[in-house]
Image (tube, rainbow, N blue to C red):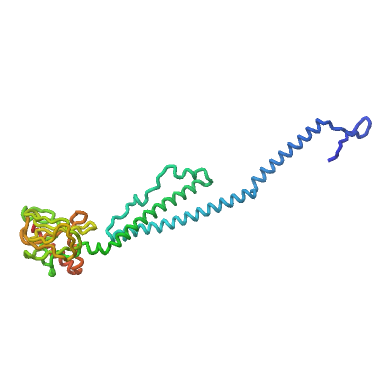
Amino acid sequence: MPKYKYRFNSESLSFVKEEASLTKKFWRGVKYLFFSIVISVVYYAVFSFFFDTPQERGLRRDNEEMLLQLELFNKRFDHLSTVLADIQQRDDNIYRTIFEAEPIPSTIRKAGIGGVDRYSDLEGLPNSEIVIETAKRIDNLSKQIYIQSKSFDEVIGMAKRKEEMIASIPAIQPIANKDLRRVASPFGVRMHPFYKVLKMHNGMDFTSPTGTEIYATGDGVVSAVIHSARGYGNTVIIDHGFGYKTLYAHQSKIIVNKGQKVKRGEVIGFVGNTGMSMAPHLHYEVRKHDKPINPINFYFNDLTPEQYDKIIELAAQSGQSLD
């Protein structure tokens, strides 16, 4: 830019050097500064709109990597959830069924994590919705894994007691009955011999001469010895543990005492005709959690499948109980 400005003088027909005043110089500088600032701002805005700064590119790259990692984590969560669901299904329908344990309710397995403000510290972060959702999935998965681990601890404990349970569960007939013809009345609704009305018969009646040996059908502890001239007459109740009890009624003589431990096959008394009984026989019951169940399903240690079918057929022929 020229250092000086010249103005044409029409009178002298010559160029005269024009001296700028200090005020003009000041405003000229202000004008240049203003336009420089405007141009810089416009340039920066346009450049920023179309182009990222190195810092912005780095942040964007980090954000994309984080989102990719979260997506991969969620896919792994989906896979782990599928595996855990399979383990839970096996636990409820196989392992716990084998040991006759109740399945864990879904309300416990799927229960949420408490606390309204549990994830409040994650709010306001970049992509907070994704982060919070991922945190929730981690917490829920962790809780389900913890519940499953406690269930397996219980199953392991039951497995250790499996041998004891196998020995304790009633598994033989309470008297010698090789020809299977001692079954006089099965479990179910039968005609009562005294009242002559249909009544639920909670056990099985085995006919046998007075004095025939009666066997404990599983290991256990004698929980009751009852001497009575009414109802079931002289009766022994054995607690086998695991929710099982057996009852042996109408005995002529009892040779065990309350609190005594007995083994499967051990003689506990002798067949009789005490109490409300029509003839010498043994009334035998199996109870699970104090609820009578059909004893015919608990002779698997001394019956073949063919004998099992036969005893069911013979039992069905009787329409009246003996007590």
- Front-most of residues 112 and 306: 112
For the image shown, how many numbered marks are present on the structure? 0
Q: Quadrant of residue 244?
A: bottom left
Counting from the top left corner in percent of width and height, residue 116 is at 42, 42
Counting from the top left corner in percent of width and height, residue 162 is at 27, 63
Judge left or right: residue 27 versus residue 177. Answer: right
- Front-most of residues 321 and 150: 150
- The image shows residue 253, relative to residue 67, as above or below, that is below
Counting from the top left corner in percent of width and height, residue 185 is at 11, 60
Res 203 visible: no
Residue at 28% of width from left, 61% of height from top?
161
Res 230 visible: yes
Judge left or right: residue 291 versus residue 49. Answer: left
Of the 4 image quadrants, the one containing the N terminus is top right
- Front-most of residues 299 and 191: 299
Residue at 55% of width from left, 53% of height from top?
65
- The image shows residue 313, relative to residue 202, as above or below, that is below
Counting from the top left corner in percent of width and height, residue 127 is at 52, 47
Q: Quadrant of residue 278?
A: bottom left
Of the 4 image quadrants, the one containing the C terminus is bottom left
Judge left or right: residue 40 versus residue 321. Answer: right
Judge left or right: residue 33 versus residue 174. Answer: right
